[in-house]
Amino acid sequence: MVEVKNLTKCYGDIKAVDDISFTVDTGEVLGFLGPNGAGKSTTMNIITGYISSTSGTVTVDGSEILENPKETKKKIGYLPEIPPLYPDMTVRKYLEFMFDLKKVKLPKKEHIDEVMRLVQISDKESRIIKNLSKGYRQRVGFAQALLGNPPVLILDEPTVGLDPKQIIEIRKLIRGLGKKHTVIFSSHVLSEVSATCDRVIVISEGRIVADAKTEELSKSFADVQKLSLTVEGGSSDVLGEIKKIPGVKKYVKLRDVSDKIAEYSIEYSNDADIRRDVFSAMVRIGCPILEMKSGNESLEDMFLKLTQNAGKRGK
Ligand SMILES: Nc1ncnc2c1ncn2[C@@H]1O[C@H](COP(=O)(O)OP(=O)(O)OP(=O)(O)O)[C@@H](O)[C@H]1O
């Protein structure tokens, strides 16, 4: 659906984006992850046709952005980092204005009603935008991006500045939109991307340093995986069984939670997924697993490693 090929953007001496290539399939939710200044906004601005590239191409649904800017832009809904809202307009007036600006060919009232329903702002249609909370203003930004039903949505740091409750709601909204649209959204928060996306591209200093399914990202970069386990039963039985599981490298009891319940940490090799074996082993000895968690710290560590090792941005 979206194909980015050898994209480079220079601002004077700075290579903000340095020869990056990737494709995004129809219906995929792609997280574009990188620290501040990595080149996320620049890439998104080029994909949406807001700025031109120094070299390279962007094709959306078979149409190249520089060759067919009008046609290509119609296929993209864009929510920039700062949504382009008119604060003195009401929500409906603003959406009507954007509908006309985008020359959308759908039945106006029905379409705006549908979009407002989708992002859950129908009850705010008569409110002046500047009086809405930041979370609702962001939803209005989503609504304008959805006008015309574009197959591709590009969202630049859509949760920045929102409170935790609003962040959860916006993530839910993005996951919902991913059912009908191809979504690319940027973030510098790893947990956000792993909670919302099928796939992650990590960008650092203008270059792609990782491109993987969210689940596989930590596996491919960390030397070991971590599992934390809370089990009811005798510790020596539990540790004795864990020891026998193929792929286990290290195991330790972290603490007693109560008389019969304890928490354990297991490290295992990258190429194994021991969760099922752990489950079967505990069933075998009649010790119920109360909690099992894959270690997220390794993901955060991996992100730091990847972005620190990327080297200095070239000229
Ligand atoms: N108009 C511009 N003129 C000169 N340099 C720019 C311009 N826009 C961006 N840059 C530089 O390009 C690099 C990438 O910036 P970009 O805004 O794309 O990063 P980002 O990953 O979106 O960061 P953030 O999360 O802080 O928004 C930075 O070094 C930035 O200073």
Image (spheres, rainbow, N blue to C red):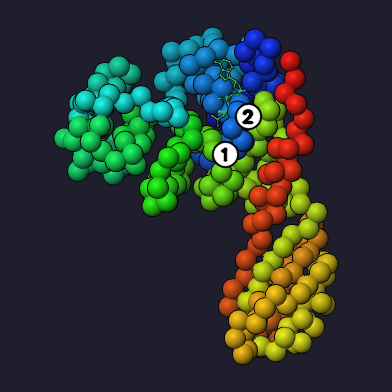
- Above or below: residue 190 compared with residue 253: above
Q: What secondary structure is found at the residue carrying circle 1?
A: loop
- Above or below: residue 190 compared with residue 111: below
Q: Residue at x 57, y 39 (%)?
A: 188
Q: Residue furthest left?
A: 126
Q: Which of marks 1 and 2 is nearer the N terminus?
A: 2
Q: Which mark is residue 188?
A: 1
- Above or below: residue 52 compared with residue 255: above
Q: Residue at x 73, y 52 (%)?
A: 219
The image shows residue 197 at horizontal and vertical percentages of 55, 45
Side (left or right) of 246 relative to 105: right
Cα gap from disc 1 to disc 2, whole angstroms: 9 Å
Question: Does label 1 point to a residue whose CB lies under 8 Å from ligand 1?
Answer: yes
Q: What residue type is labelled 1?
A: His
- Above or below: residue 136 compared with residue 277: above
Q: Which amino acid does label 2 sit on?
A: Ala
The image shows residue 208 at horizontal and vertical percentages of 69, 31
The image shows residue 255 at horizontal and vertical percentages of 67, 78
The image shows residue 139 at horizontal and vertical percentages of 33, 38
Q: Residue at x 56, y 43 (%)?
A: 189
Residue 150 vs residue 197, the one in the foreground: 197
Quarter location, residue 116: top left
Q: What secondary structure is found at the residue carrying circle 2?
A: loop
Q: Which mark is residue 281?
A: none
**Quarter holding the C terminus?**
top right
For label 2, the residue is 38
